[in-house]
Image (spheres, grey):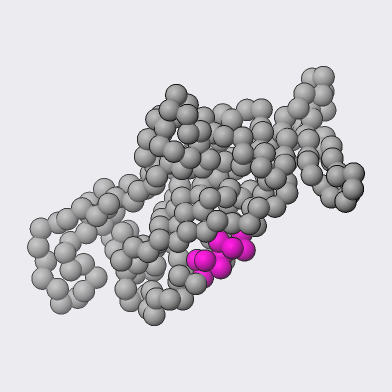
Amino acid sequence: MMLPIWSPGKQALPCTRESGTRHWATCWTESSISDLRRFPTLFLAISTSGWIPSPSWRQLCTKATMQTVRAADTNEVVKLIFRESDNDRKVMLQLEKKLFDYFNQEVFRDNNGAALLEFDKELSVFKDRLYELDISFPPSYPYSEDARQGEQYMNTRCPAWCDRILMSPSAKELVLRSESEEKVVTYDHIGPNVCMGDHKPVFLAFRIMPGAGKPHARVHKCCVVQ
């Protein structure tokens, strides 16, 4: 069984996204299934908002100083500007509600963004309840919708892994069992070099036997689930 989880997120400055809405949506979907441990279930989790915590800004701007811009009438922070401490004070990163303008997008593609993946902690609250295979693809959102810029991120939000496939404990058992037997489990994204819209779709491909997970089921030829 595969269930979609869609969460719009709540926009906040500076260009972060509160994880509370996504957390609520995932909890609601999870609680609507009576027995996740018994029934293998896959969740397609899609968010339209990248979320990246403040420690990662420091990872992106280790040699930068931060300038805060406030609204004249409310004194609310409306913009953050990170400038290099040297190099003529070059602007490295600008953050607003609908702006995430980082001077070097390669950091999100190099080694599939592994330097920032360590800050992705949202699934930690579902430990031992929902699982995900190791991510080995770059942030899936927000890509340019220009057909000529299939690898380019838009500057509207921080690139993040907004498209995920999560598994119930029983689904994880089936998937990992197929990996140990057939070595064909693949968790990846589609169209890395072509325009696929603002999201790059993700997929999980693995082989299971018909009736797998049912101790008294008849075993037939293998099928591919994707």
* Side of 192 relative to 122 (left or right): left
Secondary structure mostly taken by the magenta-highlighted segment of the chain: helix
Q: Which of 91 and 131 is in front in this view?
A: 91
Q: What stretch is highlighted in magenta?
A: 19-27
* Side of 97 relative to 198 (left or right): right
Answer yes or no: is residue 109 visible: no
Q: Nearer the viewer, residue 180 or 49?
A: 49
Work out whether 59 lies above or below 134.
above
* Side of 204 relative to 6 (left or right): left
Give coordinates of residue 145: x percent, y percent: 48, 34
Please state, as top left, top right, bottom left or bottom right, where the N terminus lies in the image: bottom left
Residue furthest out toward the bottom: 34
Q: Which of 200 and 171 is in front in this view?
A: 200
Answer yes or no: is residue 145 visible: yes
Residue at position x 73%, y 46% in the image: 14
Work out whether 76 lies above or below 150.
below
Work out whether 160 lies above or below 34.
above
Residue 180: name its quadrant.
Answer: bottom left
Residue at position x 40%, y 37% in the image: 196
